[in-house]
Image: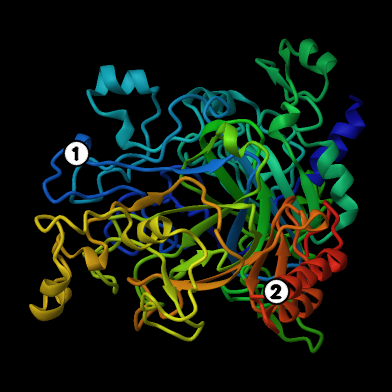
Amino acid sequence: MHTTFILFLFTLAIPFGNADVYLHNPRGNNNRCDERSNNRNNANRLFDSENNGAGGYAVGCNRPENAQTDADISCYQMKYYTDTVIPIRWTSQHNCGQNNDCQFILQYACEGHLGTNVRNGHPQNAQGNTCTKTIPEKTDRQLEEEERVNPFQYGKHEDYTYYQRCKERERNPFLFTADQKLKGKSAIYTRQNPNGNRYGFECPEERDYYPYWGESDWRDIAILTTNLDRCDYYTQNSRCFTEKHECVGGTQFSTTQEECETHGGLWYTYDKFPQNECNVTCGNAPSSTINRLGLGQNSTTHTTFHWKLPSIPLQNCVLRLRYNISTSETPWDYNVTDNHKLKNNPVKNTSQGVPVRMAVNTAQYGRVFEDRTYTFTIIERPDELKDKVIHNVNVQGKRGNIAQVRNCIEYDFVPNNITLQEDEYVHFQWIGSDYNPQGNDGEGRAGTDRSNIVVLETEKENLPMIKNTEESQEIFDEQTHFILASLRQPIQDTDKCYTYEELDTQNKRNDQEALKNCALLNRAEPYFTMFPVKPNRIGKMKAMCSRNNNFSNRGQKLTMYVLPVKKENITQGVSFESKDTIERTPYGILVPSVISGIIGGMLLVGAIYYRKSLYNKAKNIRKKLKYNTATYV
């Protein structure tokens, strides 16, 4: 590769950003583990988020009352089937494109990609605050042998050896650093991290720049940008499509094999990733209102990207989101020759000649924010589901009222409106934690998350449907609805669960802390999953979570539409995110909300229980939806 092209690539790889970002589905951790407080303990635990300490969801583990050691505690992972679609949801503090340049970079990596023993960190007892420290700069074997500690109390994403290579690699000297005084010459020192602080085993230079010119084990999912002219550049320099190179051991930073070997280095090549691990989208960045962690701008829905999972099983995966924004003070093409153009806290004259002191931190003008999920696994489909459409239904949110869950959100189903055909399947699966802050509002045992599904008669109801009503609202078989409501608690075992009479007449229903209060889901584990199920009738079902649909969170509800099967009606799943928005989920696409509202309204009007009417609505959807796999609306 020619030197001038490499330099051009470097100067384009400027970080942008100035606002927090938080993942909600799958659940982001923001460096949290088993803290029993609203703020995380340690911003250096796994990665450099730059986010507010109140963000992040608690680790997905239970907390038995008698748990004395880590062996007494069970931790769980979400498990998604191959080739299914998961809605990635997040909130960011600022908008994209209105007065800035912006990118969202979505990536993932798994066990074997990042190294071995990729993990969240495991609570050591029931008290909490036992897996919140940064892993020592040692291998797992060294920890066990030299420190005599359980290495699994520490979370780990990138591997120890990966960080050592970063630490020994000379940093890129062509990058814009403004007036920051970097305290070293290796890749752990950047304009945003001039002191070379360690965040887990993340490589600071790789974190701060995209696309990275050297080694990165993260597989690209999507680059969502306010400048689509850069899409070719992004994809051409993604490791999904091109190999990467690094000069190992040279005395000078080198951009070609000849330079590297001239300075005594070894030119090392990193192969491009297998194509079955890559499905890259480049498209428009979604926007939201400035200074609000809320819905998309001019929208009634969360910021969402639909990711079609790889077709191969993968273990211990982590989803990574980086959020970057830039203003005209740090343009895209700045490099080391522009360092003099931006200083800390400059004094400027206004057009009226009034001197004003500006709040500028050159380490943060052009700044990257990041969040990562807890680990999850992508599992092989069983033979009977190889060629079937499987819809994922999950839960987002955190225990507490709107103030207590700040930077996170309250409970909701993901998606909360979904349409499927009667020959398609639904995988119900969600995860909570027993390590939420103990004082946060909510039902059931303090500090715990639980969700179930009970059927309603209408959308506005807040009490479950009474059995044997004239018109059944259930769309699955009786056993499925029993499991969804009970979460497999042994409600017939009077030694483990209160009876209906005890709950109703003896006031046991208000015994919030009792494990026997199965009516509050106290006997259930924080993780729930069931084998994918197929509906047994067409129509519409409205449901809610009986535990969380309370005074501080009256809104954890779910609507499902089942359409009849017609040959020309077969698609990869159309899902409703709200009453006025319709989404298509196979390849990371959102359909414009205006068309969505029209179609959603058509589906909500009329006799939904008649096959002909339902078929016509499905047919209209199919005709109106137009998709482009490189577009994000």
Q: Mark 2 points at which residue?
A: 581
500 relative to 316, above or below: below
Q: Residues within 10 Å of mark 1 (few under 14, many from 20)?
A: some
Query: Pointer 2: residues within 10 angstroms few (<14), some, or many (20+)?
Result: many
Task: Indicate left or right for 586 with 391 as reference.
Answer: right
Q: Earlier in the sequence, mark 2 or mark 1?
A: 1
Residue closest to the eye, 307 or 176: 307
Q: Which amino acid does label 1 sit on?
A: Asp
Image point 87% across, 39% down: which residue?
8
198 lies left or right of 180: left
The N terminus is located in which quarter? top right
Q: Name the residue under label 1.
A: 72
Residue 260 visible (yes or no): yes
Q: Residue 20 sits in which quadrant?
A: bottom right
- Where residue 541 appears, x then y in whole percent? 53, 72
The outermost residue toward the bottom is 352
